Amino acid sequence: MISGIVLSERGAMAGPIVLFGLLMLTLVPLPAFAQQPPERKRFISDTSKLWVAVGSGFAAARAGCADCDREGVMTKSYPVMVDIGVTATPRLDAGVELYWVRLKVNNEEPIQTTFILGVAQFRPWVDRGFFLRAGMGIGIVGNGLYNPAGPPLKPPYTTNALAINFGIGWEIKVSRRLSLQVHGMQHVAALGELTTEAGESIRNVVGNYWTAGFAIVFR
């Protein structure tokens, strides 16, 4: 009888022990890979390297020089912008930009400026469309340069200039390969010294072009 009682007591104790063991198993941490947050989707696909952007917008320009009025001469126009390049990394685009703008001051002949720049476009966040950009190259200015100081410039007058570009923008995904871009940019052309028909020199001529625009982007 004693042995039977002992066996009964052991059987009664086995039930709580098993339940306690199962409870402890439920408290064991899951594997580390199951606890990691899901990876954010990249804004730029790794499968495509081509980058093409075509756009326009509204441009305002100011011509200035060492002896010109500090306020300069403001004009407005509608530019054309084309970017062609590659997506170097998920954060970086690199390529060539062609920016053309035609500006008219008073009744003078329109001034045509063409920028040919090497540009880089950087995204601080892989999964966002915000970007910063900068570029450097040449600006080709001609076809009726306007002289705010008075005498007309020697015709025909076309000059090349050191040019830079910088700006910010945002890309909005429309489909896998197509995006809509909005941006604000500034192009600067250092024209240097120009000469009028009367032989007068105009020193340190600089053209500033501000653009608020949009573009269609293919990747």
Image (cartoon, rainbow, N blue to C red):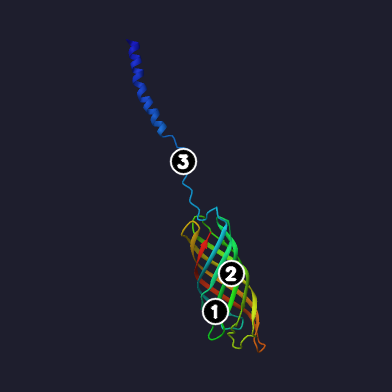
Please state the horizontal and vertical placement of residue 132, each as a whole percent of the image: 54, 63
Amino acid marked by disc 3 = Ala
Residue 63 to residue 36: above or below: below
Nearer the observer, 70 or 138: 138
Q: Is residue 189 visible?
A: yes
Q: Position of residue 107 (x, y in %)?
A: 54, 86
Instruction: Residue under label 2, please give it.
Output: 98
Q: Regarding mark 2 in the picture, which secondary structure is present there?
A: strand
The kind of residue tagged 1 is Leu
Q: Which residue is mark 1?
A: 103
Q: Amino acid at mark 2?
A: Leu
First in sequence: mark 3 or mark 1?
3
Q: Which mark is residue 120?
A: none
Cα–Cα span, label 2 and label 3? 49 Å
Q: CA distance from mark 3 to mark 1?
A: 60 Å
Inter-mark Cα distance, 2 to 1:
16 Å
- What residue is shown with label 3? 34
120 up-or-down from 100: above or below: above
Q: Residue at x 61, y 87 (%)?
A: 152
Q: Which quarter of the rendered picture does the N terminus lie within?
A: top left
The image quadrant of residue 122 is bottom right
Q: Position of residue 3 (x, y in %)?
A: 35, 11
